[in-house]
């Protein structure tokens, strides 16, 4: 899994409406103890692995950060932290083609765009993967 962040890029959601494939609304808790997702039946902690791998690459004059850091999700069996901030996270997923593996994700916290990134499920040297490169170039041409 790879997340690809673009430095100083804020997309116009209305331009991309025809590419929207999924919207999910999540309840999130942010505390000094970590990040937690609240579902109807369980509480899940999101913990990044400490062996992070991030590469910065300049493409079309923009800096793209390829983040290969894995996130471990664990069901919480003990109590939540006593001090936390609660947010509603809206995750909008866009695809150029429903059959593609590459997604463009916009995350909004309480209605304000917080993060946007490309998401690709396979992390095996994606810059040599022709399928990824075709999908990525098509998205870049569409967005830029």
Image: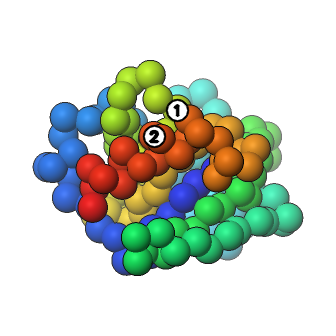
Q: Position of residue 140 (x, y in %)?
A: 36, 54
Left or right: where does residue 75 sit relative to residue 35?
A: right
| Circles 2 and 1 in contact, beta carbons < 8 Å | yes
Marks 2 and 1, how far apart at CA: 8 Å
Left or right: where does residue 128 sit relative to residue 6?
A: right
> Split into 4 quadrants, where in the image is the C terminus?
bottom left
- Mark 2 Cα shell of 10 Å, populated few (<14), some (14-19), many (≥20): some
Q: Which residue carries the number 2 mark?
A: 135
- Residue lying farthest right? 51
For the point 34% across and 35% down, which residue is it? Answer: 96
Query: Which quadrant would residue 8 be assigned to in this image?
Result: bottom left
SS at circle 2: helix
SS at circle 1: loop
For the point 27% across and 50% down, which residue is it? Answer: 142
> In the drawing, what numbered circle is on residue 93?
none
Left or right: where does residue 84 sit relative to residue 21?
A: right
| Residue nearest the observer in this picture, 103 or 72 | 103
Query: Which quadrant would residue 131 be assigned to in this image?
Result: top right
């Amino acid at each position: 899994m790879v997340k690809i962040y673009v430095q100083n890029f804020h997309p116009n959601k209305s331009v991309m409406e025809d590419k929207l494939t999924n919207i999910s609304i999540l309840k999130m808790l942010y505390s000094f103890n970590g990040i937690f997702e609240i579902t109807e039946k369980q509480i899940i902690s999101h913990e990044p692995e400490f062996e992070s791998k991030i590469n910065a690459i300049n493409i079309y004059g923009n800096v793209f950060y390829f983040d290969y850091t894995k996130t471990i999700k664990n069901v919480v069996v003990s109590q939540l932290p006593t001090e936390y901030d609660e947010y509603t996270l809206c995750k909008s997923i866009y695809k150029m083609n429903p059959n593609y593996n590459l997604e463009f994700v916009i995350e909004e916290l309480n209605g304000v765009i917080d993060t946007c990134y490309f998401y690709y499920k396979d992390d095996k040297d994606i810059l040599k993967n022709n399928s990824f490169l075709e999908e990525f170039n098509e998205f870049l041409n569409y967005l830029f």
